[in-house]
Image (tube, rainbow, N blue to C red):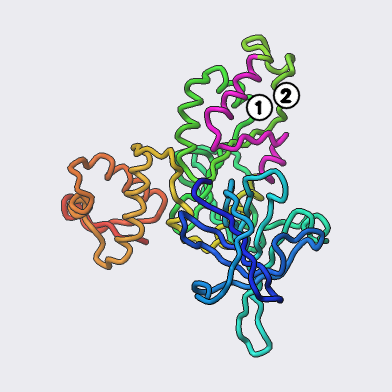
Amino acid sequence: MTGYIWQVEKTQNPRFPYRISILEDARTVLALRVQDKWPGQKGNIFCIREYGAPDDGENLEQIESVPIAFLRRQGKRVEIVLDRHNRKRCDFLFLKKVSPSGEAQEQIFFRTQTGLRSHRSKGSPLLYGSEKLEIVIDSSERYPWRFPSANLGRSRLPAGDYALVWENRYIAVVERKTFENLLHDLYEIRILHQKLSELSSFPNPAVVIEAQYGDYSDTARIGDSLSAPHINRLIGEISALHPGVQLIFAGNRKLANAWTSRFFAAVRRRIADSGQNSDEAAQRPPTFLSTPVRQDLEIRKKILEEYALRPDGFSMKELKADLGTADTAPLRRIIQQLKREEKIHSSGKASATRWHIL
């Protein structure tokens, strides 16, 4: 990540003898007073956040200035990789502890892989929580996977077969493939690329296959239409051309269902942990292009959210005026879809028809 610098300075404070700051184009993004310039054998060290600029009279001696190769906030952690060969991977863990007086106090720990490797929780998941999941299953799924603890809905999805939804926004989408489904799609690889391009325009997309990767090298199963080496080349091409889409060979139906359930739960927990709102969680990937499907989603969002506040509902004329469009065909299609999903109902007839959010 260009533009970020890791800077270490020596202070005159014996308790916190070093100051570590992260700079973006000479602007201080984060500054911490630390007990050592690198945790070393300690594994992790305690830090305190610096508020405001250092005092004018403080004598700070710069001892390191290193470009940052990777910087990411992941929930309560800030992950950093420095652009050098040694002592390059670390993170800062930000915690809140309630004091006996009831006041929330911040605790910050500077950690490296040495400390993480020796810690008893090194195998524990990073994402905790028990948020209730809302999952929409595509209406064309005849024998869908099961999600016993989730709130389920059925609808015609614009892409994929299963979607994790939060506040009427898609925050993860999974396309389900049996062994035969993927094999057939590989025969028509150009069409498959088009479908995956659409899938990749959604946040957290994945294709989950109810087969092993090795199954596609089994000549008894794949038949004579495509050779095993050619199929393997096509699968490699999928990952190369759609790097934002996870391709998961789960092994069988049960494991594919289990992986998707854990994946949806982890996405939801990550969002809750990061404090993102639903707009941020549903943010389109950088490769997003405006498509008819995406335009339909924006219209659905407007109807379900903005018109829910109108006790008298809305008419087709009002909807056209708000959206600034003269084409009623997509609007009528979306309204009929919402009606089938029992999200809206109508009153009146013909040109006097008004629609109301349920």
Give how far across and how far down residue 140 sits, in percent: 50, 37
Residue 184 in sight here: yes
Query: For the point 69% across and 21% down, which residue is it?
Result: 216
Residue 269 in sight here: no
Tell me the tag on residue 215: 2
Which residues fall within the magenta stretch?
A: 230-259
Rendered position, 244 above or below 134:
above
Amino acid, disc 2: Asp
How far apart marks 2 and 1 lie (CA) works out to 8 Å
Query: For the point 60% across and 61% down, which residue is it?
Result: 62
Give how far across and how far down residue 199 sits, in percent: 49, 37
Q: Secondary structure at mark 1?
A: helix
Rendered position, 234 above or below 146:
above
In the drawing, does residue 350 fall left or right of residue 195? left
Amino acid, disc 1: Phe
The residue pinned by badge 1 equals: 179
Q: Magenta region, mostly helix, strand or loop?
A: helix
Mark 2 and 1 residues: CB-CB less than 8 Å, in contact?
yes
Residue 253 forms part of the magenta stretch: yes
